[in-house]
Each structure stands twice: as structure tokens, then as C-alpha cells.
């Protein structure tokens, strides 16, 4: 999520002596030395219980904590949402009556996931797979549930199945995160290469880019991580939240290599566009 700095283990700056929020944090290590990965976003409540929302994983811990003044529409979690109507999920292995029951169970699993009852979500999803193992939506949600529970290997297994069925790269940043936690650096690079080649959208690509840079920082290659983030396209107009997240990760790395002037300037740029973006203002002020 080797030569790691004792100040931080990821591009977002976890492990610092003073409390700071995290623009990346993927695969960061706790004080006990075990890798940890922040949680993916919740599946948001819907008016219709039959609709499950699967989102690209832009973790709550994976960006600076935002104040309560921020609205849901301004959150990076609102970008790239992929709603799925449970009524249209296909369970090929069972008859229509059984399929309806499995759809209701999938809706229950989504509600459990939303409520952060991940073990309940796992139980429901595993029972669905026991009867109908081919639904990609079930693999995806079960993979995200394992991700939140910190079971990287099981998350990888489910999300690789999801990718194999759909050929979608939508969960590649999560897959990269899990492989980063397990220190499978080659696979992190492969997933980034696939994501960059398909280039499904700037928000998702930035998630992958931050993970890649963080994996380099994990190995002590801070300058290589900086290069990865510096090569990203510059915003043509007003920067989006995905740009600010990358700037935060980059500013953190600048500070970690001792380039305080660049770090201060970049934290300041973030504050100029989003005054309540995590602790960017605090960090800019601390750098004088």
C-alpha cells in the first residue's frame, strides 16, 4: 500500500509524528509494521432499495478529510458513480424465482456494506455465489467488502474474477492497492500499465497514478514517485478534486524529500481552490 521513511510509508504521509490526514495512504503501514489499506467508498443509500451503486474506489481515508461543510456533490466520491439496477443483474445458473431471491439478497448485501457491516455483506454475497457464481456484480462487491476488511488476497481473487468476466479496469486502483499491501510491486506496475492504456477517465487514472507513486515511496524511491505525479496532465480549466488529490500527494512527497518551498506552494494552491481540503492549509502554514 525497501527502505521506508520513518516519517511516512505512502504518498499521503501516514506514519507522521504529528496527526495529518492522508491523500493516499494506500498500503501504508501501521506502527506494528503490518500493511493497511484505507477503505473504499460506501455504496450510497438509494431511494429504491433495488438499485445498488458501485463506485470507483476513492477511499475516504485515501483523500484528505473534508469538513462537514462539503456537500456530497462536491465530494470525489460522487464522480464516476456507476449505478446498477439489481433487477437487471443476471443469475444464469438458477431459475427465475431463485434469481429474484438472489437479487433481494444482493440488495441486502449492498445495504450491509453501506452500513459498514462487512461480515454480513460477505455472508450474503458468499451465499449468492454458492448458488450462482457467475455474476460480476457479486464478485465486485465481495471484493470491495474484503478490501474494507483488510483481506487483500481474497479481495484480489474476487476483483480479478470481476475483471476477467467484464474486462473492466474500473477496480484496477483497488487491485493495485491490494497488491501494494502485499508488496507485489510488479503487479502494481502491470495494473497501472493496463489502466493507463485504457485511460477510462481522469478521476480513475489519477487514483491509479497515486497508488503507483505510493508504491515507489514505499520502497524508498521518493523521487521516482514524484516523477510519476509530475508527469500527470495539468488541468486545462479549474482543477477537479482528482487534481487536488494528486497535488496533495505530490506536495507531501516534496516535503518528505526536503523541498519545502515546492511543498508549501502546492499546498497553498490546493487551499486557493478548496479552502477546506483536509489539512492542506495547516501544512502550508507549517512550512512557513
Image (tube, helix red, strand yellow):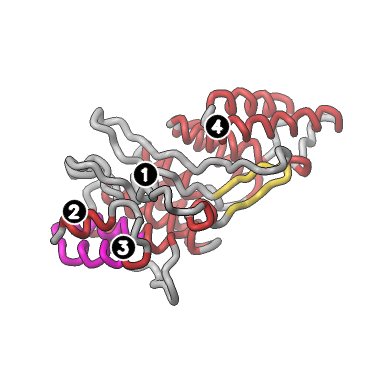
Q: Earlier in the sequence, mark 2 or mark 4?
A: 4
**Residue with the mark numbered 1:** 26
Of tags 2 and 3, which is closer to the observer? Answer: 3
The CA distance from mark 2 to mark 3 is: 20 Å
Is 256 left, or right, of 139 in this rendering?
Answer: left
Mark 2 or mark 4: which is in front? 4
- Between the residue at mark 2 and the residue at mark 4, the CA separation in whole angstroms equals 36 Å
Q: Residues within 10 Å of mark 2 (few under 14, many from 20)?
A: some
Residue 275 is situated, as x and y percent measured from the top left of the image, at: 34, 61
Q: Are marks 1 and 3 in contact (CB under 8 Å)?
A: no
CB-based contact (under 8 Å), mark 3 and mark 4: no
Identified at 44% across, 65% down, the residue is: 240
Q: Which mark is residue 256?
A: 2
Q: Which mark is residue 271?
A: 3
Task: Please state the total of marks drawn on the protein image.
Answer: 4
Residue displayed at 72% across by 42% down = 48
Residue 57 seen in this snapshot: yes
Q: Residues within 10 Å of mark 4 (few under 14, many from 20)?
A: some
Q: Secondary structure at mark 4?
A: loop
Query: Which stretch did the figure color magenta?
Result: 246-271
The tag earlier along the polypeptide, 4 or 1, is 1
Find the distance from the CA under tag 3 to the CA under tag 4.
32 Å
Reply yes or no: does residue 94 show up in magenta.
no
Secondary structure at numbered mark 3: helix
What residue is shown with label 4?
Answer: 115
Which residue is rendered at x = 21% and y = 62% of the image?
Answer: 263
Q: CB of mark 2 within 8 Å of CB of mark 1?
A: no
The reply, left or right, for residue 196 in relation to residue 285 is right
Amino acid at each position: 500500500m525497501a527502505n521506508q521513511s520513518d516519517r511516512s510509508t505512502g504518498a499521503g504521509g501516514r506514519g507522521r509524528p504529528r496527526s495529518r490526514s492522508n491523500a493516499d495512504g494506500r498500503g501504508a503501514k501501521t506502527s506494528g509494521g503490518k500493511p493497511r489499506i484505507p477503505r473504499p467508498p460506501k455504496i450510497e443509500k438509494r431511494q429504491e432499495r433495488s438499485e445498488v451503486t458501485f463506485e470507483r474506489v476513492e477511499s475516504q481515508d485515501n483523500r484528505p478529510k473534508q469538513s462537514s461543510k462539503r456537500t456530497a456533490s462536491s465530494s470525489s466520491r460522487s464522480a464516476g458513480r456507476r449505478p446498477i439496477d439489481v433487477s437487471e443483474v443476471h443469475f444464469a445458473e438458477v431459475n427465475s424465482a431463485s434469481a429474484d431471491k438472489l437479487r433481494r439478497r444482493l440488495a441486502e448485501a449492498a445495504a450491509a456494506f453501506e452500513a459498514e457491516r462487512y461480515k454480513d455483506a460477505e455472508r450474503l454475497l458468499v451465499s449468492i455465489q454458492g448458488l450462482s457464481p457467475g455474476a460480476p456484480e457479486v464478485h465486485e462487491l465481495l471484493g470491495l467488502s474484503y478490501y474494507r476488511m483488510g483481506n487483500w488476497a481474497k479481495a484480489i481473487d474476487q476483483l480479478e474474477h470481476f475483471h476477467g468476466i467484464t474486462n473492466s479496469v474500473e477496480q484496477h486502483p483497488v487491485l493495485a492497492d491490494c497488491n501494494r499491501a502485499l508488496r507485489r510491486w510488479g503487479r502494481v506496475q502491470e495494473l497501472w500499465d493496463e489502466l493507463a492504456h485504457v485511460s477510462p477517465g481522469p478521476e480513475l487514472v489519477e487514483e491509479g497514478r497515486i497508488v503507483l507513486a505510493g508504491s515507489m515511496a514505499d520502497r524508498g524511491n521518493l523521487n521516482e514517485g514524484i516523477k510519476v505525479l509530475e508527469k500527470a496532465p495539468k488541468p486545462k480549466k479549474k482543477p477537479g478534486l482528482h487534481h487536488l488529490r494528486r497535488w496533495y500527494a505530490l506536495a507531501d512527497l516534496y516535503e518528505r524529500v526536503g523541498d519545502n518551498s515546492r511543498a508549501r506552494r502546492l499546498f497553498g494552491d490546493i487551499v486557493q481552490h478548496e479552502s477546506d481540503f483536509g489539512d492542506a492549509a495547516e501544512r502550508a502554514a507549517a512550512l512557513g
